[in-house]
Image (spheres, helix red, strand yellow):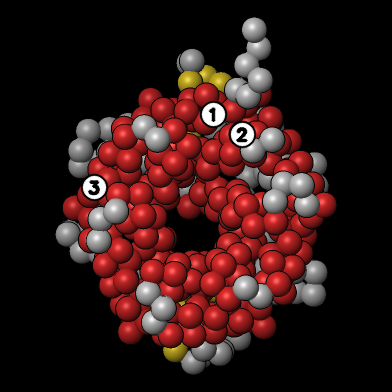
């Protein structure tokens, strides 16, 4: 008999594919590529997204192994970072803080939440400035350069921390960061550009049309709406999500966005925050139809091309089978997409 909803099993297959193709002994935990290549780079922010991905599986299944995997990944990240929460990149730290906040909710433990708050405070102390408008810089060595990848997760984290503790600093800073993105980097159609002043010339990097910028803006709007209840935020999220799919996936599938390193993770961010938007507006909303259609079309393509060795290995363009070497960032995006597909089909 045909399984009426095979997508949870397919999401499991992608989760286990991360270990099958990339798993490595501690302290490495995951090889950067399959087949194994250069492991010299410590990809702090990739590991932060692995925590989130494992928590997706835990929330879907309730199985403790996935929660344990999230905890182990967090411990690995911290250990490989010399025991510290912090590095030079504000966006990296904010991704970890978002994962820690979810880990705190999943476990009921206070320590991950305290760590998320510590990262938020560190980012404000060292990265918040008034250059080109109030907001968060990208990294400590370029305080003049601001972008969506830093201000988007900052706004999301600020909204979530406000949900735990209504300290006005969280909501004030998060709203300012979101409004900065809106005023500086969002076009009339809702498309979100990457950043401004990277080279110190005040120029906006319109050549970088990346999925994760769209996902972050959507996610920030939805997160702030959850604590502010502003209908215009949901409308802005719908507009950006719809435009992103039209511009970046005209045939329903996002192609390769770069070399597959950091860029391999970009798609996953879009899927994650499309999921939060769908949760906010409901699958029956007319605005949900193109978003659901995109998730279904693209994950159908991923399933058709990604099966390998009894597991799943994703390439950078899901229209095609993976062409090794493949970075594990790409696999994490596939996991996040398939988790969203499983959630959509479970809610039918």
Circle 1 crowding by C-alpha within 10 Å: few under 14, some 14–19, many from 20: many
The CA span between labels 1 and 3 is 27 Å
As drawn, 47 above or below 197:
above
Q: Secondary structure at mark 3?
A: helix
Foreground of the two, 191 or 202: 191
Question: Which mark is in front, 3 or 2?
Answer: 2
The CA span between labels 3 and 2 is 32 Å
Residue at far top of view: 1
Q: What residue lies at 62% left-to-right and 16% top-to-bottom?
A: 3
Foreground of the two, 86 or 4: 4
Residue 39 in the image, given as x and y percentages of width and height: 31, 42
Task: Kindly identify which residue carries mark 1.
Answer: 8
Q: What residue lies at 48% left-to-right and 52% top-to-bottom?
A: 262
Circle 2 crowding by C-alpha within 10 Å: few under 14, some 14–19, many from 20: few
Q: Name the quadrant of the C terminus.
A: top right
Would you say the residues marked 1 and 3 are in contact, meaning their CB atoms lie under 8 Å apart?
no
Residue 342 visible in the picture:
yes
Question: Which mark is in front, 1 or 2?
Answer: 2
Task: Kindly identify which residue carries mark 3.
Answer: 76
> Which of the 4 quarters of the picture holds residue 183?
bottom right
């Amino acid at each position: 008999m045909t399984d009426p909803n095979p997508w949870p099993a397919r999401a499991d297959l992608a989760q286990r594919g991360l270990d099958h193709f990339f798993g490595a002994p501690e302290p490495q935990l995951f090889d950067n590529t399959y087949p194994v290549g250069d492991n010299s780079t410590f990809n702090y922010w990739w590991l932060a997204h692995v925590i989130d991905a494992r928590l997706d599986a835990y929330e879907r299944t309730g199985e403790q192994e996935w929660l344990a995997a999230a905890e182990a990944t967090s411990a690995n990240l911290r250990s490989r970072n010399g025991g510290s929460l912090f590095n030079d990149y504000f966006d990296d730290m904010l991704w970890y803080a978002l994962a820690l906040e979810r880990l705190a909710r999943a476990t009921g433990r206070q320590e991950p939440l305290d760590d998320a708050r510590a990262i938020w405070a560190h980012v404000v102390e060292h990265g918040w400035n008034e250059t080109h408008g109030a907001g968060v810089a990208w990294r400590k060595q370029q305080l003049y350069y601001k972008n969506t990848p830093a201000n988007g997760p900052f706004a999301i984290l600020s909204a979530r921390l406000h949900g735990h503790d209504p300290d006005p600093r969280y909501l004030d800073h998060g709203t300012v960061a979101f409004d900065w993105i809106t005023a500086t980097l969002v076009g009339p159609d809702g498309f979100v550009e990457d950043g401004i002043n990277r080279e110190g010339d005040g120029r906006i990097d319109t050549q970088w049309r990346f999925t994760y910028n769209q996902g972050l803006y959507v996610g920030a709007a939805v997160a702030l709406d959850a604590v502010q209840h502003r209908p215009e935020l949901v409308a802005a999220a719908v507009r950006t999500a719809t435009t992103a799919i039209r511009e970046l996936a005209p045939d329903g599938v996002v192609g390769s966005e770069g070399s597959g390193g950091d860029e391999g993770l970009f798609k996953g961010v879009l899927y994650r925050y499309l999921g939060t938007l769908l949760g906010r507006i409901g699958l029956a909303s007319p605005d949900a139809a193109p978003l659901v259609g995109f998730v279904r079309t693209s994950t159908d393509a991923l399933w058709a091309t990604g099966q390998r060795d009894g597991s799943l290995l994703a390439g950078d363009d899901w229209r095609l089978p993976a062409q090794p070497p493949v970075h594990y960032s790409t696999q994490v995006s596939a996991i996040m997409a398939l988790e969203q597909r499983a959630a959509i089909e479970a809610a039918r």
